[in-house]
Image: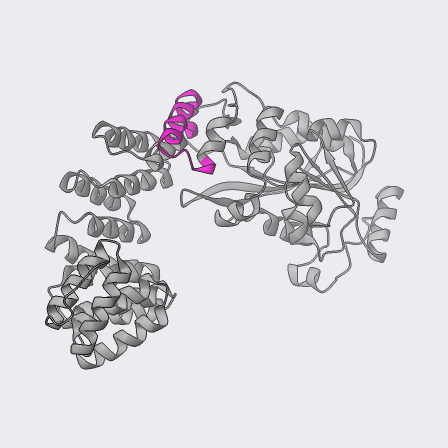
Amino acid sequence: MDMFDTTADPETLTRRADELLGAQRPGAARALLAAAQRLAPRAPRTASLAARMDMREGNPAACLAALGQAITLAPRADLLMLRADARRQIGDLVGAASDAADAVIHDRLNPAAKALLGVLLVELGRPEDAVLCLTEAVKAVPANPAFREGLAGALAAAGQPVAAAATYAAGIVAAPGSLALRNAAIMLALRGRHFAAAITLADAACAVGIADVTTFGLKGHALSNLGRHEAAADAYADALKLGPEDATMRRIAATPKIRPDATRAPVDYLRSVFDGYADDFDTHLISLGYRIPGVMRGAVCKHLLNGPDSACDNGAAPRKPVAGSPPEMQGAIQAGLRGQIGPVLDLGCGTGLVPVALSDLPLGPWVGVDLAPKMLERAAAKKLYAELHEADIIDFLSDDPRQWKLILAADVMCYVGALEPLFAAVHASLLPGALFICSAEELVGPNFGNGDWVLGRRFAHARDYVARAADAAGLTVRAIDAEVQRYDAGAAVAGFLIVLERPDAIR
């Protein structure tokens, strides 16, 4: 049991309590702090330590109350910065920025206050103002890696990636042991699709012996984007050695790799990958800002239901029959006017995110197809599908005799390089006049592959190739619209939302 002299002066008690808190002994620190508060209830340092302990114990309300009283008595910069941090943690960014600005006013030479204000201004969407604050903080303490990282982040947010990269480079020179600064620099390179630069930065971190699981994971990401899949596998394996508890890295390192000359992802690979993270799939995609189900909803409303999304929400009638369309399509449309348009086939349905986004539209019944049984289990739990099938999508289209009024494929073509076999199978499975709506990632530099499609981290396709492959399969292009698919390493993944139609007349 610790024995403390609680008759000491409050300054000594507070200093000792602070030391104990830093030594991970919060119980003992709280006892000494209570003694200090009895002796000097209004002392700013005592109030500061009490607030830090309250935040550490998950009690922001008590922290803010204590700081409010202390700031009223002594509006010091350190107390204002503490309250700014507390307000930031509970989501009050405006209040936090106000406190940080007051801290700068009370101590104009305090670089930490300027840096905190700068970071908060970035979060408030004011990166240009943030750059001014963080530039002053860096000038005052050039070797502080956190200030450098903050300034680089503000410059990137302000649309100045070259200046941001230069700031990271200067920061690495000034603080070569800062792993956070190095990893942030690699991330910036990835966001700009400067994959070779990202690899160089990662190798430099390895050379000085400070790389971690994030460093190797980002290096693997860059290598795979350059089509260097064997080297990427080695980087992911190194990441797994450093972070064996990392579920994502464990999954990536354990799954078989796609050969660079493959025209589509192997069935076993896809089943292994998606069974491996079925439990986290929905949460993971949402965290990446995955947009395709919502974008597909808009396309269905526009191209099938002939109205804006609000009209779809209000139960507007589906499109009217096209003059001269064959009797079976006329019947399908008339059935839609009475109720639902369907059945709808969801290729690569995963956990069922697409029907979740479209469930209130007059579509159905829904039929889902996926390779991964665990993904199908999650889809079945949503109770939106009339049927679910474990099968390869092209095999299913070839073997099932039905024809469909709508076929959807969200985030599927990124696992298919050559599109001709898929498009031909889709054409044969659509009713005349019916639609195929799918998403694809756009082929943008670097220049490798065959010019039509390329295997980077996933397959990406050129716009004109999609159109040519559709035409070769007998499908008419209704739309190939540029759409952000999701966000990868903080950067938008460019792609398309594609709407293809099987013509009414046989070509």
Residue sitting at the far bottom: 73
Q: Residue 362 appears at what percent x and percent y? A: 76, 55
| Image side of residue 222 versus residue 302, left or right | left
| Image side of residue 101 versus residue 157, left or right | left
In the image shown, does 437 or 30 lie closer to the viewer? 30
Boundaries of the magenta span: 224-248
The residue at 18%/55% (across/down) is 135
Count of marks placed on residues: 0
The quadrant in which residue 103 appears is bottom left
Q: Residue 138 appears at what percent x and percent y? A: 15, 53
The residue at 20%/52% (across/down) is 147
Q: Quadrant of the N terminus?
A: bottom left
Q: Residue 62 appears at what percent x and percent y? A: 33, 73
The quadrant in which residue 181 appears is top left
Look at the image and tell me whether residue 128 can be seen.
Answer: no
Residue 490 higher or lower than 210, as above or below: below
Q: Residue 369 appears at what percent x and percent y? A: 71, 36
The residue at 20%/75% (across/down) is 37
Q: Quadrant of the C terminus?
A: top right
Examine the residues drawn in magenta and state their main secondary structure: helix
Look at the image and tell me whether residue 369 can be seen.
Answer: yes
In the image shown, does 59 or 269 lie closer to the viewer? 59
Is residue 245 a member of the stretch shown in magenta? yes
Is residue 95 a member of the stretch shown in magenta? no
In the image shown, does 43 or 283 lie closer to the viewer? 43
The quadrant in which residue 174 appears is top left
| Image side of residue 311 versus residue 118, left or right | right
Residue 449 higher or lower than 81, as above or below: above
**Colour scheme employed for the rendering of this structure:** one colour
| Image side of residue 30 versus residue 324, left or right | left
